[in-house]
């Protein structure tokens, strides 16, 4: 009995064990099914997921193309720059991070301010923000040692744009800067993967597309922590194209030297090609300061400077052309029959419209006597041109001058230039909703009134003179040497030669307005001076230079070309409040012509380095304050 | 004293005779050894080629095997008599853990007593509890009565509650399971089982309410790992990715990107099977499952041979608990069960787990050992 109970119990347990074993076997089969599903059926899906885990595609930014001057000197290059970067999305407490950085390397208030500004500016998600630029090797090492403690912080040697000539090229090359949100919407985003900068102005902007290059792709294996283990494969980026310019950096340095500490602008052009040989706008600024994002203080200094160093006078400065356009206007007058080469007038020092008492004065109080068109150019006789303007009428004047490129933006690779104003009845109706007065025609005859031009326009127009009646669009790069220009259909070649001869006499003639600047000249310059009123002078008042506030003095202008027979350079320059074109602007031009015609051939193509740095400090105005 | 037949049987070696006489079962020991060796090989890869870790784990295995051999020698009646005391001691230690335990990540699981290695009293309970329930139920005839079952339930609930409070959900579930298996094997009626099952389902909402937040997230994450792919779902997603991307033959030893690049969490402990799956593929996991099947099968055979009801019930419970380990770990890694901290038996790195498992095997061996030789000698 006892035994049978024990046997029954034993069987009970063994039965239950069998049930459990069968149940367990079923569960094991379930697991196997699950594993078959995972490993044999859905393999591909999980392999894709695993590869996506493991492989990261990193954009490899291409090296930005260089910008080189006509002699092959590099004007814009890429300099390795050790940057301390931070990805804000990966950092818990940025303030703590910054204080950690501060405890290791020098981190000035300026750095902190720049960083705060960088942090605030809009960017793509996960784009790193520059904490500190231009780390020294030892600073980089100090941070690198502890880098693993700070997720989100990284050190990268990123090539950064550098302009070796600083302020000398700022107004022509422009600069690159961080992509702004507006720009992000305009660009093809994939091309800028890995690139955080874009040409903001000047040549950098005009040739952005070519300079940028083609982004490369690197696939890397990364750990779960994002640490890069190794490179799997790599499509090399295609570096951006180098952009060769007509610019001559030696000449450009000379332009700034000649301007000295005056405000003004000079544009030098190659009449053969229309290429811009040099462009100066003084004072200037160091474009390098803009690369990594300029600090608020630095920007403010530039902004409040009443000499407006950021303002590009050469492209955006709109000055009345004054007498500089007299040779061109003369050709227009001849073309439309308002005057002939033979016609003479008698100048008593002023011009009057019939039925009007108002005297339009000549700059020479007692007049030039008997004046023909050549003399009117050489001596810059205002009365002659007042009268011619009235005969010509504003619309024909405007029509003729349009051939020289006035009243519109210059094309090709020039960024940000202003159109100026070439006045006409139509223009005044549209712009001011007013009708035209004859008196306005009179003063237009001497390039005053509504008429404003940029130094670039003056250079382009003078180039058309140098080319004896052929207008070519001014441009920076050799790449734009694409056509032979457009003929200016005014007069015949004899007319152009004769007008150039008159311009030669402006310097070389006994009574030329710029004769003082031509002393001892062993080559021939053809030119024209201009003196532009900044404030109106009442009828019987005398203009007393000494008594007038410096900023209200006349602007001094000069346009010219040399050598007169077969020109290799054209200049247009404006010196703000410089006084008279003949005494201030022409001597400045003379220095530049001398450099081009004489000194340049002595072999020095580039300005020497100490000279550039002195120039930069002298011209930049703020440059020395920022050299911390 | 060896008789002539004994000598004959030794000459034609028979595992059953050997095991029954000397305690240690050669087949089970062999299966365990092969599995542990497989585990060491995987551990080398999973630990990022850490030889020192492999050596330490090897030492755990050697120590465990030694303890197993010793336990297998203990006389069954000593184990039976010692059971209530060991259980009481284990309860005491669990209370001590709650009072003065140490731990990490918000859980208090370890006891750090001077002069002793740091250990988890819950490991002791893994064997003490089924032994205690067995002890209780085998005092009377089987199948147990309702009142017996009520006491048994109390014996289970108290330690489970203590462990759940640490909190250690995985261990408390497994220990509850080991106690339940005893009751099940003892012949609880199917009707009662059905009622208990119904009550269990009904109490799920209550369980839900007492669970900690992180435990709830684990359950929710199981239902939809993609709901929080970088947080709670990360482990499951990465483990499934590792397994799935291994395919049939795997990516090669020590060449699993999920494991080696640390996308796989806990790759040398709870999630080590994902490393096998990734690097050795379906073939590698199948090999492991075969090894487990052999161990389980052998344990079943030994349980069938176990002496006395106490031996059978305890052996059966330990065997089933071992199975639960395997199933829960594999289920968790392959994404069919919530992530609970259950190591893969004999493979996952960790000394306590290995030693306590091998003590379990030692008990199974002890239970099937006949006392004939000993009693013959006495």
Image (cartoon, coloured by chain):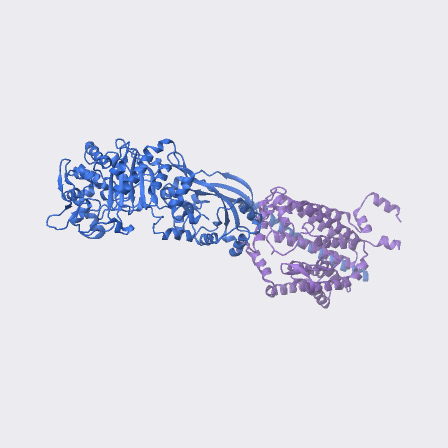
Colour chosen for chain B? purple
In this picture, is B159 found above or below B352? below
Quadrant of res B175: bottom right
In the displayed structure image, the side of residue A622 where residue A343 appears, left or right: left
Colour chosen for chain A? blue
Q: Is residue B124 visible?
A: yes
Quadrant of res B106: bottom right
Q: Which quadrant does the N terminus of chain A fall into? A: bottom right
Query: A69 and B177: which one is in front?
Result: A69
In the displayed structure image, the side of residue A354 where residue B212 appears, left or right: right
Q: Is residue A470 visible?
A: no
In this picture, is A413 found above or below B133? above
The x and y percentages for residue A119 are 46, 53
Residue under the point 14% across and 46% down:
A351
Residue under the point 83% across and 55% down:
B371
Query: A218 and A331: which one is in front?
Result: A331
In the displayed structure image, the side of residue B134 where residue B252 appears, left or right: left
The x and y percentages for residue A243 are 39, 37
The x and y percentages for residue A343 are 13, 37
The x and y percentages for residue A374 are 18, 36
Residue under the point 54% across and 40% down:
A232
């Amino acid at each position: 009995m006892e035994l049978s109970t024990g046997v029954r119990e034993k069987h009970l347990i063994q039965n239950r064990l069998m049930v459990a074993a069968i149940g367990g076997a079923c569960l094991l089969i379930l697991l196997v099914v699950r594993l078959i599903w995972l490993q044999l059926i859905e393999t591909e899906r999980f392999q894709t997921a695993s590869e996506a885990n493991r492989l990261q595609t990193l954009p490899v930014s291409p090296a930005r193309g260089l910008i080189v001057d006509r002699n092959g000197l590099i004007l814009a290059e890429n300099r390795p720059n050790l940057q301390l970067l931070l990805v804000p999305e990966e950092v818990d407490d940025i303030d703590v991070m910054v204080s950690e950085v501060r405890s290791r390397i020098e981190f000035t208030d300026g750095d902190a301010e720049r960083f705060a500004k960088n942090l605030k500016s809009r960017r793509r998600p996960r784009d790193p923000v520059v904490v500190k630029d231009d780390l020294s090797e030892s600073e980089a090492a100090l941070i690198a040692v502890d880098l693993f403690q700070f997720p989100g912080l990284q050190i990268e040697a990123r090539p950064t744009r550098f302009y070796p000539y600083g302020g000398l090229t700022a107004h022509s090359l422009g600069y690159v800067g961080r992509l702004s949100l507006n720009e992000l919407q305009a660009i093809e985003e994939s091309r800028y993967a890995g690139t955080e900068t874009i040409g903001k102005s000047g040549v950098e902007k005009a040739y952005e597309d070519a300079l940028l290059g083609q982004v490369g792709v690197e696939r890397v294996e990364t750990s779960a922590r994002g640490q890069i283990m190794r490179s799997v494969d790599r499509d090399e980026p295609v570096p951006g194209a180098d952009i060769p310019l007509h610019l001559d950096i030696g000449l450009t340095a000379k332009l700034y030297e000649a301007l000295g500490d005056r405000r003004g602008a000079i544009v030098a052009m190659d009449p053969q090609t229309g290429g811009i040989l040099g462009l100066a706008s003084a004072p200037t600024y160091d474009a390098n300061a803009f690369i990594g994002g300029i600090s608020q203080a630095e920007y403010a200094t530039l902004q409040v400077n009443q000499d407006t160093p950021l303002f590009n006078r050469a492209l955006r400065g709109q000055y009345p052309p004054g007498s500089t356009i007299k040779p061109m206007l003369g050709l227009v007058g001849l073309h439309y029959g308002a005057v002939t080469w033979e016609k003479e007038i008698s100048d008593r020092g002023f011009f009057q419209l019939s039925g009007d008492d108002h005297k339009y004065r000549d700059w020479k109080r007692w007049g030039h006597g008997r004046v023909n068109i050549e003399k009117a150019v050489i001596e810059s006789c205002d009365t002659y041109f007042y009268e011619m303007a009235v005969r010509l009428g504003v619309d024909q004047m405007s029509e003729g001058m349009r051939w020289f490129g006035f009243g519109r933006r210059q094309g090709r690779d020039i960024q940000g230039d202003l159109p100026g104003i070439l006045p006409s009845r139509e223009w005044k109706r549209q712009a001011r909703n007013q009708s035209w007065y004859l008196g306005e025609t009179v003063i237009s005859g001497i390039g005053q009134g509504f008429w404003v031009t940029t130094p670039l326009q003056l250079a382009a127009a003078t180039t058309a003179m140098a080319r004896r009646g052929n207008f070519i669009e001014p441009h920076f790069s050799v790449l734009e040497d694409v056509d032979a220009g457009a003929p200016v259909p005014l007069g015949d070649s004899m007319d152009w030669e004769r007008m150039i001869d008159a311009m030669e006499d402006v310097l070389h003639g006994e009574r030329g307005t710029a004769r003082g600047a031509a002393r001892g000249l062993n080559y021939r310059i053809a030119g024209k001076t201009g003196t532009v009123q900044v404030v109106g002078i009442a009828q019987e008042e005398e203009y007393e230079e000494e008594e007038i506030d410096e900023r209200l003095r006349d602007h001094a202008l000069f346009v010219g070309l040399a050598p007169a027979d077969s020109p290799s350079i054209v200049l247009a320059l404006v010196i703000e409040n410089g006084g008279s074109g003949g005494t201030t602007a022409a001597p400045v031009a003379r220095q530049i012509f001398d450099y081009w015609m004489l000194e340049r051939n002595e072999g020095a193509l580039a300005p020497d380095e100490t000279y550039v740095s002195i120039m930069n400090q002298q011209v930049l105005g703020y440059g020395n304050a920022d050299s911390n | 004293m060896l008789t002539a037949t004994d000598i004959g049987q030794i000459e034609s070696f028979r595992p059953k005779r050997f095991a029954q006489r000397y305690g240690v079962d050669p087949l089970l020991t062999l299966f365990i050894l092969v599995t542990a060796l497989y585990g060491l090989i995987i551990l080398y890869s999973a630990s990022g080629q850490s030889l020192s870790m492999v050596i330490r784990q090897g030492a755990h295995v050697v120590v465990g095997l030694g303890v197993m051999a010793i336990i297998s020698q203990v006389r069954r009646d000593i184990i039976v008599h010692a059971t209530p005391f060991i259980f009481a001691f284990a309860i005491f230690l669990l209370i001590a853990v709650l009072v003065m335990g140490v731990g990490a990540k918000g859980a208090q699981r370890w006891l750090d007593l001077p002069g002793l290695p740091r250990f988890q009293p819950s490991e002791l309970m893994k064997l003490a509890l089924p032994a205690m329930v067995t002890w209780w139920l085998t005092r009377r005839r089987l199948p147990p009565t309702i009142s017996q079952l009520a006491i048994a339930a109390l014996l289970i609930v108290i330690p489970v509650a203590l462990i759940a409070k640490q909190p250690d959900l995985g261990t408390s579930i497994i220990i509850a399971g080991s106690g339940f298996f005893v009751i099940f094997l003892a012949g609880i009626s199917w009707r009662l089982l059905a009622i208990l099952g119904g009550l269990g389902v009904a109490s799920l909402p209550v369980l839900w309410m007492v669970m900690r937040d992180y435990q709830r997230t684990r359950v929710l994450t199981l239902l939809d790992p993609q709901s929080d792919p970088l947080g709670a779902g990360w482990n499951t997603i990465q483990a499934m990715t590792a397994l799935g991307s291994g395919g049939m033959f795997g990516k090669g030893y020590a060449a699993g990107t999920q494991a080696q690049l640390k996308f796989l969490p806990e790759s040398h402990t709870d999630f080590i099977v994902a490393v096998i799956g990734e690097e050795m593929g379906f073939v590698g996991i199948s090999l492991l499952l075969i090894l487990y099947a052999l161990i389980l099968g052998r344990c079943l055979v030994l349980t069938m041979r176990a002496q006395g009801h106490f031996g059978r019930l305890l052996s059966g419970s330990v065997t089933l608990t071992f199975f639960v380990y395997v199933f829960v770990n594999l289920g968790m890694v392959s994404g069919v069960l919530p992530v609970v901290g259950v190591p893969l038996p004999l493979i996952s790195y960790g000394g306590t787990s290995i030693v306590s498992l091998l003590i379990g095997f030692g008990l199974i061996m002890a239970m099937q050992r006949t006392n004939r030789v000993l009693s013959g000698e006495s």
